[in-house]
Image (cartoon, grey):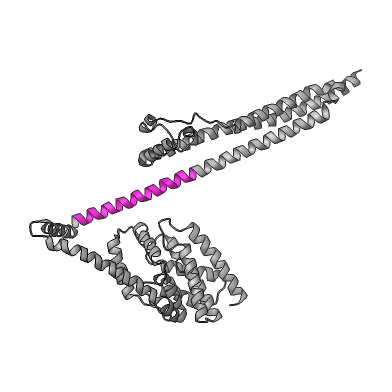
Amino acid sequence: MTETQLSLIQQARTVVTDMLSHKLSKDIKFHTLQHTQEVVAACETMANYHQLAGDDRFALLLAAWFHDTGYTGGTAKDHESLSIKLAEDFMQAHSVADDIKGKVTGCINATRMPQGPETLIEKIICDADLFHLGTDAFDEKNKLLRQELNEFGDNDVSKKDWRKINIRFLERHQYFTAYAKEKLQPEKEKHLAELMEKEEKKHETMKPEKKSARPGHSGGEKEKDKDKKKEKEKDPVALAEAAEAKLKREKEKEADRSIATVFRIMAQNHSALSQMADSKANILISVNSIILSLLIGSLIDKLQTNTSLQIPMGVISIVCVTSIIFGILATRPNVSHGTFTRDDIAQKRANLLFFGNFHGMSLQDYNWGMTEMLSDKEYMNNSMIKDNYFLGVVLAKKYRYLRIAYNIFMYGLILTLIAFAVSFLMPQATEVYN
């Protein structure tokens, strides 16, 4: 690859890393930045094995970086289309040649299920996307994928069903490149054999139960339950109720996310405002301390010979000291008794999100209190509301003291300048009069 192409790959890496780090749903467990990095690494390995030319290698790596960016759109369905658009926007902004654009688009399109690659680079990215099927990481990645399907895809795939899905998928799947067929296929077949063995063992353990079942007994009851379930599935009213229940769950889930976002933003804002207030108070205290030091060091001797400086010196000293006092009041910490009782938890009075309410308790009591709070959604939300409220009260107190300190400093400086002016003008006026 040329230096320009290497530079563009680095830029693509930066853009995609930022995108997948900040715009990806937390419910996505498999198609993360780590997965994209692993696909890119697998593409590089197979590109070296197949001795790819410069433009093909460049197009392959660009496609590898962007192939799953479509998940940032909030849905897994047809995420490849958004991935292609994001890749095209990047290539358009960096004036990438049209033939390379076509190769990148073809590579991302080829990763759609079922995969249908035509060119070598399309075959490489398809094998890289499912590289884990032929590695020791299969079990770990498989768990993450099921977790993602259940949380992000809002499915309810049991372990039993997931094993059957994997067996069916592995039986139908094929690697396309010579590298994958040589290096990955044998390991993939081992995983398939292990899954099939587990499935067979489960069937064997279930067979005696089925044989012992008699009509009118447990077996007959199971058959009746199945018939009822089928009737329920065919009933349009039941289907409508199920759809409504699912929609309600989705709304509740979305509401919980919105609530968490609001509390997080409020906490960040309060923290930023508190740091800002402390910073302003420290500046004011430092400035007034320096002024006092300079005045005392340079003018203290002159007060004995020039009594007219006593009033302005007294004014500026009072202003500086008062400003320092209010600045200290704005930053002075206030810690409460730090204990709570079981009755406080039962009555939902204690806010365990603030350290001042639990620092005097033992770890065992605090652990018990937190467990009680976290098990009660209403109590937890009320605690977060209280925490935000009292943070706001503390902030208001900080800024009130800070405003008083700045007002004293501002008007005190004006008064001091007037006092100095009067002290210098009065002797001159006295001399002219005499």
Residue furthest to the top in view is 434
> Where the C terminus falls, by quadrant?
top right
| Residue 314 x, y percent position in the rendering | 76, 23
Q: Is residue 88 visible?
A: yes
> Where the N terminus falls, by quadrant?
bottom right
Q: Is residue 169 visible?
A: no
In the depicted view, which residue is nearer to us: 420 or 372?
372
Q: Is residue 403 magenta?
A: no
| Residue 317 x, y percent position in the rendering | 74, 26
Residue furthest to the left in view is 216
Residue furthest to the right in view is 434
Q: Is residue 253 magenta?
A: yes
Up the image or down, 294 lies above or below 116; here it is: above
Which residue is drawn at the image coordinates 30% and 67% (left, top)?
165
Most prominent secondary structure in the magenta stretch?
helix
In the depicted view, which residue is nearer to us: 372 or 326?
372
Which residue is drawn at the image coordinates 40% and 37% (left, top)?
369
Q: Is residue 405 left or right of residue 384?
A: right
Quadrant for residue 330, please give it.
top right
Q: How many marks?
A: 0
Q: Is residue 57 left or right of residue 221?
A: right
| Residue 300 x, y percent position in the rendering | 82, 26
Residue numbers of the magenta segment: 238-266
Up the image or down, 429 lies above or below 356; here it is: above
Quadrant for residue 200, please give it.
bottom left
In the depicted view, which residue is nearer to us: 216 or 14?
216
| Residue 129 x, y percent position in the rendering | 43, 71
Up the image or down, 142 lies above or below 4; here it is: above
Which residue is drawn at the image coordinates 57% and 73% (left, top)?
95
